[in-house]
Image: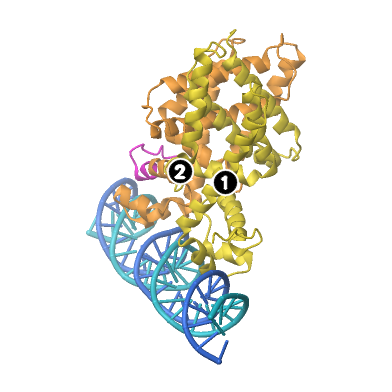
Chain colours: A yellow, B orange, C cyan, D blue
Amino acid sequence: MAKTETPGGTKDRVLDAALASFGTAGYDGTSLDDLAIGLGIRKQTILYHFVSKRGLLNAVVDRCAGEMSSALEEALVDDQPDGDRVEAMVRAVFRVALDQPVLLGLLREVSRPNSPGAQRLRGHLEPLLARARVWMEAEMAAGRMRRTDAQLLLLSAYSTVVGVATEIEVLRAAGVGPTLRPVVQRRRELLRFLRASVDPAT
Amino acid sequence: MAKTETPGGTKDRVLDAALASFGTAGYDGTSLDDLAIGLGIRKQTILYHFVSKRGLLNAVVDRCAGEMSSALEEALVDDQPDGDRVEAMVRAVFRVALDQPVLLGLLREVSRPNSPGAQRLRGHLEPLLARARVWMEAEMAAGRMRRTDAQLLLLSAYSTVVGVATEIEVLRAAGVGPTLRPVVQRRRELLRFLRASVDPAT
DNA sequence: CAGGTAATTTACCAATTGGTAGAGAAGCGG
DNA sequence: CCGCTTCTCTACCAATTGGTAAATTACCTG
């Protein structure tokens, strides 16, 4: 029967609130009671839908990883076959970061080793990373990309992107308004860095 | 009188353990009871020395910020007057990161906005950042450095450095041994990035 | 030895936490 | 109207949490 989960339903509202709370207050800093009160419902309703707090985190991680993945897939598909795929992906990720900053907050929270949900996130990201690594190695073999450690480069780019979320908040705290400029500048820098790491001419 | 705090004393042992726990399990994920048990003492002993959990966090942050600051000061002082100060500072920070990875873990934990201790960390870092900004702006005015937004550049470099801590752990989780190579490579990349951002010729 | 101070401990406590058990609602097909 | 499923609620609980109060020990000094 596969009920298509009305977006206005309780389950989705809980997911939204949980994403925001996990991303800002952290997993341990989030209490199911507070979460429920904020939604005007009772804690048991949350537990009914997600069994346990851990289950809720898993659901949030699954959903975010899904959104991020499909954003990347999209960027790879409807782009010109041999256009700058790297740039397309970076732009896609930054677009997500701007549309839903909380998502990067969660990514940051959950990408800490020993964090609950870290393993699950890896499960989602690993196939993506594997594909990217294979592609990069093919490019390097074909001489279209400078020889370098693909995994390290990817990890570096990843941490840079996640770092953006933090920076935006830190800048805001430092009095630099929530303008677009820092993000755009950061994206430009990251692209320059990636091109430099990738350019076979160097 | 200023008792010079014997390094083997209980207070320092608590600080060490708290640093490790806050940096890996997070502030909320750390319980005073567990901390005490791990040290073979009672929780009240911790509270006697640091009044409250928050006080303990503040003490840990103070100590770490102090170590980081003095490492930076040292790099700036005993270096050649107009040698590559940027490189000296980067090397200093990476040295700290390698000697005490937990320290970067705490930095990461505490640099999350809305985190307890974030404000205190800012209090320590702000004067450093201000000095660096002033220096950079002077360099730019003298034409020895490319015109760019000093604050953004510093923030970018900062988040990159903090990202290293995570990466090391993630790599280890991914099966890449705790070798020096990733760190060295990352440092090289960061330096290249900084030079590119700074080079007036570009 | 007296006595004060610093350090650590035992004994409790109120509040919060994630979670269980079960009772009502609400809607729906027969 | 009945029975079934889905969803939400009230009631309760055991465990853990940070923290207070006071007793105890260790140590130093006069």
Does residue B192 appear in this view?
A: no
Q: Earlier in the sequence, mark 2 or mark 1?
A: 1
Question: Which is closer to the viewer, label 2 or label 1?
Answer: 1
Q: Position of residue D5 (x, y in %)?
A: 49, 72
Does residue B125 appear in this view?
A: yes
**Does the magenta-highlighted stretch encompass residue B67?**
no
Left or right of A104, for residue D4: left
Q: Chain of mark 1?
A: A
Answer above or below: position of C14 versus A85.
below
- Residue type beneath disc 1: Cys
Label 2 crowd bin: few (<14), some (14–19), many (20+), radius 10 Å: some
- Could you tell me which secondary element the residue under label 2 belongs to? helix
Q: Position of residue A172 (x, y in %)?
A: 70, 41
Residue highlighted by disc 1: A64
Q: Quadrant of residue D17?
A: bottom left
Q: Chain of mark 2?
A: A
Along the line of sight, the residue nearer the viewer: C7 or B133: B133
Q: Residue at x 52, y 60 (%)?
A: A31
Q: Which mark is residue A118?
A: 2
Label 1 crowd bin: few (<14), some (14–19), many (20+), radius 10 Å: some
Answer above or below: position of B52 versus A64.
below
For the record, the magenta segment spans B1-14
For the residues beneath circles 2 and 1, the answer to whether they share a chain is: yes
Q: Position of residue A72 (x, y in %)?
A: 60, 35
Along the line of sight, the residue nearer the viewer: C3 or B41: B41
Q: Which mark is residue A31?
A: none
- Residue type beneath disc 2: Ala
